[in-house]
Each structure stands twice: as C-alpha cells, then as structure tokens.
Amino acid sequence: MTAPERQRDLEDGIRGPGCCLCAGRNAYLAAFLEMSGLDIQSVLLFEFSDTFYDATVMLVIDDVTQAIVVIVRGTLSSNETLVDMLALGEPLRQEDKKLPLEERFMAHGGMVRVARNLSEKIVREGWVEKAKHLRPDYPLVLCGHSLGAGLVSLMSVLLRPQYPELKAYAFEPPGALMK
C-alpha cells in the first residue's frame, strides 16, 4: 500500500463524524501529531476507547528512533478513573494463580485486566506483525504515562515471550503497581 493510500485509509478510519482531524476524539490524534512532529503516515493505528477495561492506544512507526511504538494514554476518562480505583491485587499471569500466594506475581487488579486485554488484542490482531512488515528491523517499544505507564509495565511482562526485543518506557507509573 502506498503512503497516500495509507493516509486516505487512516483519515477515513479516524475522522469519524468530525469534519476535520481536530474534531471530537481526533483532537487527541491532532495534538499527538503536533507535539511529536510525526506525520499521519507514521500512525498505523489509533484506537480511542472509553470503555471499561480498555485504553486509548496508538501504534506508530518512528523512523527517527527506528522503533515500532505502542503508546498507551494515561487516565483521562471516568472509566479510566474507575480502573485506577480497582487496586485490589490480582495475579498478572494465569500461571501465577497456581503458585502459593506468597510466590505469586501480583499487581493492581484494574490495570491487570486492561493490560491483559490490550496484550491479547495486540497479539490477536497482529499489530506488531503489520508494522514489522513495513519496518522488519525495528524493535517494539511500549510507552505510557500515569495509568498508561502502569499498563505498559504490565504489558511488557505479558508480551516479552512473543517480542523478546521489547522495551518499555513508563513515565510516572502508579506507586503501588505490583508485588
């Protein structure tokens, strides 16, 4: 697919009911593009979500840093605030449930559920593979702030088996994230 075709597909897929890129939900994308200096062709996926146990994410190719980057937004919506409050510890990986309590890898329950959902979606829908088709030598990088930082910290543990080159940058993650 050529860059103009990809741009047209992206614009069709992300504009929705707004008349321009800065309308409605796309204000997030417009702000990101302005602040990052990237152009819209760099954005492979933008999923705005305001549903429970999900998060707003973006998949971009950054040719400056030579990386495939998954960006997870921090707390902004009321549903994300509720996820923040669901702090009861929960095993991160399924295999942790079989271990004695003192040996389990426990983490913030709300974030565990969102991190699992996002990690499963990334693998199931082949996000990284689609990006690797365009830039096969670029490593996977996860990046987030606040709630997004907590999510990428947990996602890095969950996704490491599939993507051993993965790096995560977590800016100001919640203090009581995991044990």
Image (cartoon, rainbow, N blue to C red):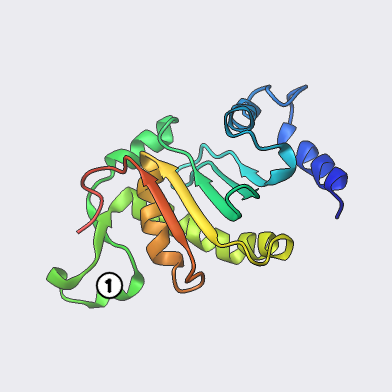
Expressed as whole percent of the image width and height from the top left, the position of residue 170 reads 37, 47
Which residue shows up at 36% across the image and 34% down it?
Answer: 81
161 lies left or right of 46: left
Q: Would residue 125 be visible to someone looking at this image?
A: no
Quick one: which residue is furthest to the left in this view? 102
Query: Residue, x 35% and y 48% (percent of image)?
Result: 150
Percent from the top left, x then y, of residue 179? 19, 59
Q: Give percent across and percent down for residue 160.
A: 44, 69
- For the view shown, which residue lies furthest in the front direction? 64
Asked which secondary structure carries label 1, the reply is helix
Task: Examine the image and state in which quarter residue 36 appears.
Answer: top right
Q: Is residue 157 above or below residue 53?
A: below
Amino acid type shown at disc 1 = Asp
Does the image show residue 38?
yes
Nearest the eye: 25 or 142: 142
Q: Which of 134 and 59 lies nearest the eye of the viewer?
A: 134
Q: Is residue 4 left or right of residue 88?
A: right
Residue named by callout 1: 96
Measured as percent of width and height from the top left, residue 56 is found at 53, 41
Q: Report the residue at 25% width, 50% height from top.
A: 177
- 13 relative position to 151: left or right: right
Q: Is residue 33 above or below residue 87?
A: above
Residue in the image at 16% along x and 75% along y: 100
Q: Quadrant of residue 101?
A: bottom left
Q: Nearer the viewer, residue 85 or 65?
A: 65
